[in-house]
Image (cartoon, rainbow, N blue to C red):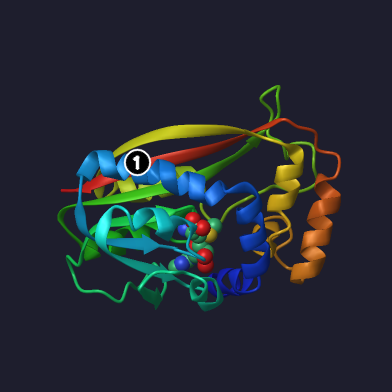
Amino acid sequence: MKDAIRRNFDVSVGSYEAFESETGQFAELAERLATVVDDATGDLESLLDAGAGTGASTRRLEGLAEAVVALDISWPMLRENPAGRRVQADFDHLPFGNGSFDAVVFTASLFLTPDPDRAASEAARVLRAGGVVAAVAPQGWTTADGRDAFADLSRDSRSPSAAAEVESALAGRFTLETGAWTDEVSAERLRRFHSIPAVAARLYPTLPPDERVQEARALLADVEGPLEQRWRWLIGRQA
Ligand SMILES: C[S@@+](CC[C@H](N)C(=O)[O-])C[C@H]1O[C@@H](n2cnc3c(N)ncnc32)[C@H](O)[C@@H]1O
C-alpha cells in the first residue's frame, strides 16, 4: 500500500500545488498546528516536518526552529520543497539517530500511513527526552444537517488510517492533548480537492489517475454546500 501512496503523490504535484495556491488549505492547517506547537514549546533547535510535501507546512514550521528537516516518501513532492535539508524516507524507517529532534510535526500526513503505530514509535525514537510530537488528521465533511457528505454516495471516503487510529497510536507513546477545528467549505472546494489524484484515490484506488479524478468529479457533482470540514489536532510530549 505504501508504494501506491507514494506513486499517488508522485503524480499529484501539479494539482496539489494548484489546489493549495487557490485555497491555502495546507498553509492554514500548518499555521494552526505551528501555533499549538509554539505555545507548548517556545524556540526549538531542531524540527522534523514529517510528510512535508511541496512545502506549505515547511514554510511555516521554519519559523519555529533553527533547523528544519523536510521528509517525505515522494521525491517529486519534496523536489518542490524549499527546505535546506530534504530527505526522501518513510515514516516507518526514519533515517535519523535516537534523540535527533526537539519536535516532529505531521501536517495532514500521519493518517496516510497504514501503520500509524509504527510511525509513532519511530517519531518517539528520534525525539529527545521531553520532545514534542504534533499531528493534524482529517475527520471528513458533513452537510448542513450534520450528515456525512458521502452518506448517500456509492463510495466511502476512507483514509488508510482514521483520525481515531492516529490518536490511539500517539496516545500509546506520548501524553496527549487534542482538539478539533471545523471549517465551512463549499461543495466546489470538495470537488477541487478531489481533482488531486492522491485524494481521489480515497474513492477510486484502482483506477488510473486521470480516470479516478473524472469519476470523483462525477460522483461529487450533485453534492451541495456549504459543508463542514472537520480536523482533529493532537500534540504530545515524550515522557
Ligand atoms: C496531504 S500532503 C501534506 C504535505 C504538507 N505537510 C503540506 O502541508 O502541504 C501529505 C504528504 O505526506 C506524504 N506521505 C504519505 N505517507 C508517507 C509516509 N509513509 N512517509 C513519508 N511521507 C509520507 C505524502 O507523500 C505527501 O507529500
Q: 146 and 164: which one is in front?
A: 146
Give the x, y percent position of residue 239: 15, 48
Q: Secondary structure at mark 1?
A: helix
Callout 1, which amino acid?
A: Thr
In the image, residue 71 sits, relative to residue 216, either above or below, namely below
Q: Residue at x 46, y 33 (%)?
A: 180
- Residue 90 as seen in the image, left or right of residue 12: left
Q: Residue 112: in sight, yes or no?
A: no
Q: Residue 163: in sight, yes or no?
A: yes
- Residue 202 as seen in the image, left or right of residue 207: left
In the image, residue 176 sits, relative to residue 10, either above or below, namely above
Q: Residue at x 22, y 64 (%)?
A: 125
In the image, residue 139 sits, relative to residue 113, either above or below, namely above
Q: 7 and 87: which one is in front?
A: 87
In the image, residue 6 sits, relative to residue 184, either above or below, namely below
- Residue 17 as seen in the image, left or right of residue 104: right
Give the x, y percent position of residue 162: 52, 47
Give the x, y percent position of residue 140: 60, 40
Give the x, y percent position of residue 16: 63, 61
The residue under label 1 is: 35
Q: Residue at x 30, y 57 (%)?
A: 104
Q: Residue at x 37, y 61 (%)?
A: 49
